[in-house]
Image (cartoon, grey):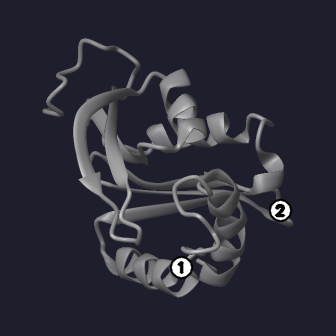
Amino acid sequence: MDLPALLDLQEPGAVAGLSDVFPQESHPFPRDAVLARWRVELADPGVAAYVAHDGSRLLGFAARRGDEVLHFGTALQSWGSGIASWLLEELLATFDPEVRRIRLWVFTDNGRGRRFWEKHGWQPTGRTTRSTFAPYPTLLEYARSRTGDESAPADGSR
């Protein structure tokens, strides 16, 4: 995976989408730290990473581990085009069939992100944690059944 190209795609979306969470004047995109995190995660055999491209340019990325979406994003210029919805469906199809409930973390103050996940059937679980990146904003856990069947256990059991 071409990590510099991935960061070139990830950074503009993170800056645009998370400026309320990470004010750029005081907390600019931590490119080196994000690159280091990607390297560690990609070295983990339990992490699967995916990129979407149109043959000439990168359109999006996703990574997962176990029952969790670790990373998900699309090129800033593709926002509103439906690529994110397509990429999400492609990603959901890669989870082990025994995983009935999938989870992820969204910044509490990321309204755009939360609207996207909720539109696709994800629900907040009420669990929170803090980001490892300053200013350490709160993340809210979201979950949904793999099939959209909300009878799947809410506790994440398989």
31 over 91 or under it: above or below: below
Q: Residue at x 41, y 68 (%)?
A: 135
Toward which corner of the image does residue 6 lie, by quadrant? bottom right
**Quadrant of the rendering where the N terminus is positioned:** bottom right
Where in the figure is residue 19, as x and y percent of width and height?
62, 57
Q: Quick check: 60 above or below 36?
A: above
The answer to which of 39 and 76 lies nearer the viewer is: 76
What residue does disc 2 label? 55
Left or right of 96 in this view: 70: right
Q: In the rendered structure, which amino acid carries the disc numbered 2?
A: Gly
Q: Secondary structure at mark 2?
A: loop
Residue nearest the observer in this picture, 119 or 129: 129
Element class at badge 1 = loop
Residue at point 40% right, 19% down?
148
- The kind of residue on which mark 1 rests is Pro
Picture coordinates of residue 4 (x, y %)? 66, 83
Q: Which mark is residue 128?
A: none
Which label is found at residue 30?
1
Q: Residue at x 71, y 74 (%)?
A: 8
**Mark in front: 2 vs 1:** 1
**Quarter of the rendering containing residue 122:** top left
Q: CA distance from mark 2 to mark 1?
A: 28 Å
